[in-house]
Image (cartoon, coloured by chain):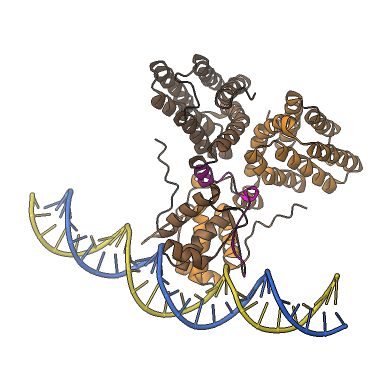
Chain colours: A brown, B orange, C yellow, D blue
Amino acid sequence: MADNDLTSPGLHGSVLDELGALITSGGFAAGQVLRIEQLETRFGVSRSVIREAIRVLESMGLVTSRRRVGVTVAPRTAWNLFDPRIIRWRLDGDDRDEQLRSLSELRRGVEPVAAALAARHATPEQCGALTGAVMQMAVHGRSGDLEAYLVADIQFHRTLLEASGNEMLGALTEVVAEVLTGRTHHHLMPARPKPEAIRWHAEVAQAVQSGDAEAAERAMRDIVEEATRAMLGDDQ
Amino acid sequence: MADNDLTSPGLHGSVLDELGALITSGGFAAGQVLRIEQLETRFGVSRSVIREAIRVLESMGLVTSRRRVGVTVAPRTAWNLFDPRIIRWRLDGDDRDEQLRSLSELRRGVEPVAAALAARHATPEQCGALTGAVMQMAVHGRSGDLEAYLVADIQFHRTLLEASGNEMLGALTEVVAEVLTGRTHHHLMPARPKPEAIRWHAEVAQAVQSGDAEAAERAMRDIVEEATRAMLGDDQ
DNA sequence: AAGGCTGAAAAATCAGATCTTTGGCCGCAT
DNA sequence: ATGCGGCCAAAGATCTGATTTTTCAGCCTT
């Protein structure tokens, strides 16, 4: 599966994970103050460990630390919502639906552009990987093996984003993989993938291979709009 | 102006800034190892300060820390390219052009979607803010006051992204502001804004106000495509 | 009521000791 | 010679107690 660790090793890593999950899930309300000493005893570790975790949380915008006051939980508007760990925590917590919606809308903007760019930058290997992924999708889509379909789907989108030649779009690979995984595992997609979906993927692969940016963008737009519709209802 | 600090206060903040800038600018090559003790003397601060800075760098994917080995500078593929500080460092360093290109392509995907969403979610206040920003742009565009134009431009895009009702798109506000600021300050836009640009902004504001998602998306696409073209040449 | 002073609280920093992990070396058996 | 296993030392990880610095909050003055 998506073999992401995302958890730093060591004591501070576990503290970070636990605090991060608590904050993003609303276990600590915004504005609540945590005392370092309090956390020390709660987790049974020393100050340095707590402080390092707090520093990372601070760098993610989840808390602010001020002398004489303590560590204050920050409002959601201050969070770095693109941090992979925050995305993961929110997908694992109560915010899942909201997070999936945000990410789907983001995909709707990003992936068509990535497809267009890929049409102009993809290497022959990447084109091969794309068509290969589509074939896998077709096979497993027909047989109804959703897990295998998911793997091929992720492979397709990962390759496409990387082929865009844009580092930042490439960096969204993990995010897109999370969305695809999430919608499959939470049964937000049909029991059997729509044949059109597979056809559109094939069209994208074809367009990328022939360097037709506009066609690639159009077909990709079809894909993500259909996906959004399927996942969120007819919300355009 | 965009009053972003982005620099945590305290010693560890300065160390973080300096190390981050060094790494992202290639001052330290990927694979190079830094010893904590070495850094201690180099910056004249104690271990705890260095460690906290290292933890944050690690959480941004810039370095990895392993016992018995030291702190290793990570390859660019491991970096969290969406971290605002990394964006800032790269914009301030040698990567500026590459960074601006990546960001522009990202904008090209994101902003039209945000415009469409804003057309369906914007509050009356936000509509007012949009038209206000457009008027400011028109005034300062005609008078050739690029700084004031920039402020209004940022205001426009900030409001629009926030009005999308999508947290993640809203989180891109700072990023977009950086792009706009960057292209103005590095003279990547014409001495006098094109009249069409202002007209398109007005169209977006109008479409958002009347709830016409498609028109808003289309006009916004015109804006960002023109901006990309102006900044990077005729690259589509 | 406004502004400035002061004390204490809590984080920030420092520094020394100790713990834990781990890469590399050495020796043994094959 | 080759490969496996255990030992050692290096370097980060953690703990801890002392000290410094910042800043909130209450008090005092005007």
- Vertical position of residue B28 compared to residue A134: above or below: below
> In the rendered image, is residue A225 in sight?
yes
Q: Residue A117, position in %: x, y?
A: 60, 29
> In the rendered image, is residue B35 in sight?
no
Is residue B23 found left or right of B193 in the rendered image? Answer: left
**Residue lying at 53% horizontally and 69% vertically, measured from the top left:** B42
Is A82 within the magenta? yes
Quadrant occupied by the C terminus of chain B: top right
- Vertical position of residue A191 compared to residue B193: above or below: above
Residue interval drawn in magenta: A68-90
Q: Residue A122, position in %: x, y?
A: 53, 28
Q: Residue B163, position in %: x, y?
A: 72, 37
Is A94 within the magenta? no
Q: How many marks?
A: 0
Is residue B147 found left or right of A66 in the rendered image? Answer: right
Residue A69 sits in which quadrant? bottom right
**Residue lying at 47% horizontally and 24% vertically, measured from the top left:** A130
**Residue lying at 48% horizontally and 48% vertically, measured from the top left:** B75
Q: Residue D1, position in %: x, y?
A: 16, 51
